[in-house]
Amino acid sequence: MVMTWCGENENVRAAVLTSSRAREDGTADALSDYDLELYVKDLAPFSSGDSWFERFGEVLVRWPRTPGTTFSPRWITRLVQYTEGTRIDFQITDGPLAYHENFDAGYRILIDKDGAGSTLLPARSERLLISKPTEEEFAERINAFFWDILYVAKSLRRDELFHARYMLDHVVRYSCLLPMIEWYIGMKNSWKVGTNKAGRWIKPYLPGDIWLLCEKTFPGPESAENREAMKKMVILFGKLARLVGKGLGYPYSEDQEREILAFMDRIEGTSL
């Protein structure tokens, strides 16, 4: 329906499918959305209302809430979840059809009425691969991990669950632990793989024992569970840092890891 409408609408000059649905690597599944870029002559019909995409089915939810929302110059964003199950992420521009970073993850030209896409380069997927860290980057992540993990210990001792989980799950997990996991995966795969956003694809790349340790860093609400998960995160981080450090010839202090774990025990036993 969308492609028929695009073909019949003179305002729409090109339509490009990007990301997982445009690739043939088996990463798309029944839950994958359609990332669709529309190249148009006039943005006005898309900024004034949403009736243009409501014709394709009953809308369950849309984002952003208001029509015409622009997050970057000359682009309108309309992300639509239809009730029957299909999700289409529309990005609409009156700019030229030219290669840009969204194409790195794969793209397929569906409609090109003016032949503007005939000279586009193939997807530069190598830009999405895990990059080998410098020794300074490696040392900075270690330092950040040991600094921030102590906030978790203090918040758990104070019974501040929201802050503890914010630090554990948002700051430490994604700013410190995830990069170390990705560096391990990159090193083991000659820096020729990527793990997508927020570690979506890390599980298939990890040995069973490391994945099991990863799972144990996701606790329930009880204080004891959170303290145990926090310590498991230190153990996991240390295990990966030793492996990455050994593989890349970068130093890692096991003494500091032991001291951090001991300091956590001191925090847990502190009288408030």
Image: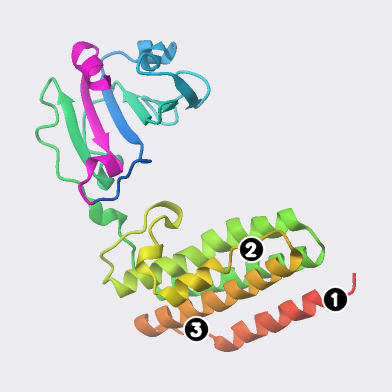
Magenta highlight range: 1-25
Decide: is 39 above or below 138: above
Name the residue nearer the viewer: 234 or 60.
60
Viewer-side label of 1, 3: 1
Q: Quadrant of the C terminus?
A: bottom right
The label on residue 270 is 1
Residue displayed at 66% across by 85% down: 259
Q: Residue at x 65, y 59 (%)?
A: 167
Marks 1/3: CA–CA distance? 29 Å
Q: Residues within 10 Å of mark 2 (few under 14, many from 20)?
A: some
Neighbor class of circle 3 (other Cα within 10 Å; few <14, some 14-19, many 20+) is some
Label 1 environment density (alpha carbons within 10 Å; few <14, some 14–19, many ≥20): few
Q: Which residue is mark 2?
A: 219
Asked whether disc 2 touches disc 1, contact meaning CB atoms under 8 Å apart, the reply is no
Give the percent coordinates (x, y) of residue 20: 29, 44
Q: Position of residue 153 (x, y in %)?
A: 72, 69
Above or below, 120 relative to 214: above
Amino acid at dot 3: Tyr
What is the tally of numbered marks visible in this picture? 3
Q: Are marks 3 and 2 in contact (CB under 8 Å)?
A: no
Asked which secondary structure carries label 3, the reply is loop
Residue at 76% across / 63% down in the picture?
Answer: 155
